[in-house]
């Protein structure tokens, strides 16, 4: 039997009954103590969890449509504007591999740019530094949503986030379109079996914003919906990559009307998940469907990141007192703390086991 199998067997018996430690030799108790120390160190390294949006801004917890956004914040000027604008909560920006303007001879690096643009005056390192300084030096509350357009940029960005982890006390979303979606969307999505393991291993506290590669056709397209197969492909990817961190699903507004049932199923299938409804300015669709969605699943689980005109129509259609009419959400555990609770429980069980089994 391998040593790892012995560890698994030991842990299983200890958690079932701490007195089982007595059947093991002093050497096995030493193994258990080593595991205890390792898990304790892991908890220490994790520190305080990064807050999710509804923890950072408790006033939006019952109605996530109150969250406000900047879009394509891919230049120094746009970033400074978003940081100084008190009406903006979440700063959305795209990340691609490319070059800093005027410096094309250096190797590509993660920059703030949306394809097909390959240059920017803002690298991801500069972007993150500006956000950290603004929050640390001023009375500024911001979160960031990082929209990865190139899988090659992911690891370097996650490493930078990990290096500055002790300075991050605000929401961080890691976004990518990882599944092919409606309607016969061209192009390849970001590989889920590369993106998800990287996020899980190198920045497990970030909220995952997971979407489908999509293509808008026209307002009355009967195929403008998320199919069961597309949604199941998403949940399968999450399960096989052992994702435990908070998840929001990025859903295109034009496909909501014909997808109400499957979106409700998705929220039930993935505990503590939310939806983030987004749209392009040129999309034409039944905006009333967004109100139906909010009424169906609850205002506390749906973000709305819409262009100005569409947002205005959405606000005009929904009941003025909607947010106040929803039942307040009550949580014993903050979202995203399953991993912490699991580790803490394991540490506690091992500590009790070790104390009971001492000679």
Image: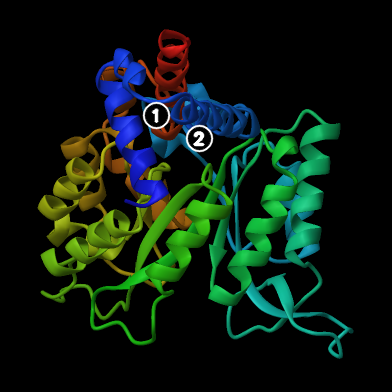
Of tags 1 and 2, which is closer to the observer?
A: 1
Query: Which residue matches tag 1?
Result: 342
- Tell which of 341 and 210 is nearer to you: 341
Disc 1 on helix, strand or loop?
A: helix
Q: Give x and y (percent) for residue 155.
A: 62, 65
Residue lying at 54% horizontally and 67% vertically, measured from the top left: 148
Q: Badge 2, how many Cα within 10 Å: few under 14, some, many 20+?
A: many
What's the coloring here? rainbow
Q: Determine which of the numbered discs, if any, sits on residue 58 in the image.
A: none
Residue 139 visible from this viewpoint: yes
Mark 2 lies on residue? 53
Q: Secondary structure at mark 2?
A: helix
The answer to whether residue 300 is visible is no
Q: Residue at x 27, y 42 (%)?
A: 317
Could you say which is closer to the camera, residue 192 or residue 2?
2
- Residue sitting farthest toward the bottom: 105
- Residue 48 occupies quadrant: top right
Residue at 32% across, 74% down:
214
3 left or right of 69? left
Asked if residue 354 lies left or right of residue 289, the reply is right
| Quarter of image, res 143 | top right
Residue lying at 24% horizontally and 83% vertically, measured from the top left: 184
Disc 1 vs disc 2: Cβ atoms closer than 8 Å?
no
Q: Position of residue 80 (x, y in %)?
A: 79, 52
Question: Image height check: is 219 above or below 104?
Answer: above
Picture layout, residue 178 above or below residue 249: below
Q: How many labels sit on residues?
A: 2
Residue 161, placed above or below residue 106: above
Q: Tell me which numbered mark, 1 or 2, is placed earlier along the sequence.
A: 2
Residue 65, quarter of the rendered image? top left
């Amino acid at each position: 039997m391998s040593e790892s199998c012995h560890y698994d067997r030991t842990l299983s018996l200890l958690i079932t009954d701490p007195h089982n430690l007595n059947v093991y030799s002093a050497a096995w108790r030493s193994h258990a103590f080593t595991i205890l120390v390792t898990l304790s160190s892991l908890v220490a390294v994790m520190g305080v969890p990064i807050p999710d949006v509804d923890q950072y801004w408790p006033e939006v917890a019952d109605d996530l449509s109150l969250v406000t956004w900047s879009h394509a914040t891919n230049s120094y000027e746009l970033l400074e504007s978003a940081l100084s604008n008190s009406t903006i909560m979440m700063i959305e920006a795209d990340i691609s591999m490319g070059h800093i303007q005027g410096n094309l001879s250096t190797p590509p690096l993660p920059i703030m740019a949306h394809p097909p643009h390959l240059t920017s005056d803002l690298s991801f390192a500069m972007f993150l530094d500006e956000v950290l300084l603004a929050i640390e030096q001023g009375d500024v509350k911001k979160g960031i949503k990082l929209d990865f357009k190139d899988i090659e940029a992911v690891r370097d960005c996650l490493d930078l986030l990990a290096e500055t982890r002790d300075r991050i006390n605000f929401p961080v979303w890691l976004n990518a379109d990882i599944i092919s979606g409606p309607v016969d969307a061209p192009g390849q999505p970001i590989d889920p079996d590369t993106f998800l393991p990287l996020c899980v291993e190198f920045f497990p506290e970030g909220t995952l914003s997971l979407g489908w590669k999509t293509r808008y056709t026209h307002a009355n397209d009967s195929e403008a919906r998320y199919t069961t197969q597309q949604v199941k492909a998403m949940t399968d990817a999450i399960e096989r990559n052992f994702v435990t961190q908070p998840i929001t699903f990025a859903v295109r507004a034009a496909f909501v009307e014909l997808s109400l049932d499957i979106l409700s199923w998705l929220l039930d299938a993935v505990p503590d998940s939310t939806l983030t409804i987004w749209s392009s300015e040129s999309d034409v669709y039944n905006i009333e469907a967004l109100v139906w969605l909010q009424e169906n699943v609850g205002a506390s689980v749906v973000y709305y990141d819409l262009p100005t005109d569409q947002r205005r129509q959405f606000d005009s259609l929904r009941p003025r007192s909607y947010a106040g009419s929803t039942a307040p959400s009550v949580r014993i555990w903050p979202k995203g703390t399953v991993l912490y609770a699991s580790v803490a429980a394991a540490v506690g069980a091992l500590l009790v086991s070790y104390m009971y089994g001492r000679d």
